[in-house]
Structure formats: structure tokens, C-alpha cells
Image: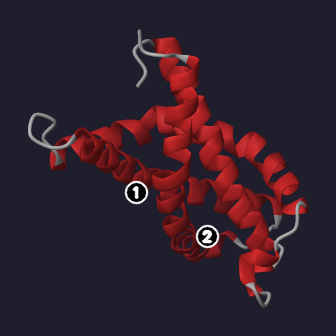
Amino acid sequence: MPRTKKQGIVFGLLMSYIMAYGMEVYNVAIKQGFNLNVGGFSTMTNHVFVGAAIEASYMGAFVFITSSLWGNRIGAAFAKRHTDPAKDNPYFCRIMRQAGTVAIMCPTMSLIASILFNLILAHTNPINLPAIWIGTVIKNLPMAFFWNMFFAAPLTHWIFGKLFPNP
């Protein structure tokens, strides 16, 4: 885990962009209709990854900013409320912090994406924003949770450990 401000920024950037990229692969594949094909996401083609990289390039910045401003703090508060580091397994404490952070970040990023992709770029009537936002949260929350728990967090911790090995 980060021990300095610089390490915290590196860790935050890694996590933000890994989360953003995974979520954009998911959303671009849905936008392109792969989830509706016989075989579902297994029918994806490589161009999904290119479109996701383009969107993740700027969505990662939104993730970094919002997680730095409130997502990580609220996630830490959630973990503090539901775990006791003196008694609980450290891995359980980390999982609870991740769960709390995802529970805040998914609705936040879903709102940003709804405004950006539906209102600004697609010119949807703003009166529909609440429904679009709730639908986006429903679609993204399961993916965000499992992507974070089983891929983004472990990969971020592994890369961070290679960049900043413990002395």
C-alpha cells in the first residue's frame, strides 16, 4: 500500500485507469450489441478494446478526480464502520474498503457517464436523466464490483508492488 503522497498518486492513477478501462470494455461491448448476440460477450472483436481505450483515456481522469475527492474517503469510512483491523483479517478489511469505494464510485461514475454520453453527446432530453442514471447504475454495479474485486485491485496491487517493493 502507498506510504508517501507520490506513491498514493501512482496507486490512484493505476487503479483509476485499470477500473476505467475494464468498465469501458464492458460498456463499449454493450453499446456495440455484443451482449445481444448468440454467445454474448464471447463474440466480441478486438475493436472493442480500441474504443474502450479511447473512452478510458478521459474517463480514467474522472475516476481519479472523484475517487480522490470523495470515493476513497467514503470507502475508508465504510470499512472503518464495518471492520476492526485489530480483530479482522487484513484481507477482509481491504475487501470491505473496496466494496465501500465501489458502492460510491459506481453511482458517481454512472452519473458522469449518463450526463456525458446521453445528455451532452446524444442530446437526450434532460428530463430522462434520473431514469438513465438509475439504469446505468443497474447495468454497471455488478461489473464494477466483480471487476474491482477480482481483477483491477489485484492487478493494481501487483503492479504497485513491482514499482515500489517493500524494503
* Residue at screen point 49% across, 61% down: 146
- Quarter of the image where one finds residue 14: top right
**Residue 64, x across and y down, in percent:** 58, 35
**Residue 67, x across and y down, in percent:** 49, 38
* Residue at screen point 49% across, 54% down: 150
Left or right: 139, with 3 as reference point = right
Residue under circle 1?
A: 103
**Residue 166, x across and y down, in percent:** 42, 15
Determine if residue 108 is in view. Answer: no
* Residues at marks 1 and 2, CA–CA distance in whole angstroms: 20 Å
Quadrant containing the C terminus in the rendered view: top left
The amino acid beneath tag 2 is Leu
The amino acid beneath tag 1 is Ala
Q: How many labels does the image show?
A: 2
* Residue at screen point 39% across, 47% down: 98
* Residue at screen point 70% across, 49% down: 21
- Quarter of the image where one finds residue 76: top left
Quadrant containing the N terminus in the rendered view: top left
Q: Is residue 66 above or below residue 37?
A: above
Tell me the number on the disc at residue 75.
none
Determine if residue 17 is in view. Answer: yes
In this view of the protein, which residue sits in the foreground, 40 or 24?
A: 40
Which of marks 2 and 1 precedes in the sequence?
A: 1
Furthest toward the right, the residue is 47
Q: What element carries label 1?
A: helix
Residue under circle 2?
A: 129
**Residue 43, x across and y down, in percent:** 82, 77
Q: Is residue 157 above or below residue 101?
A: above
Q: What element carries label 2?
A: helix
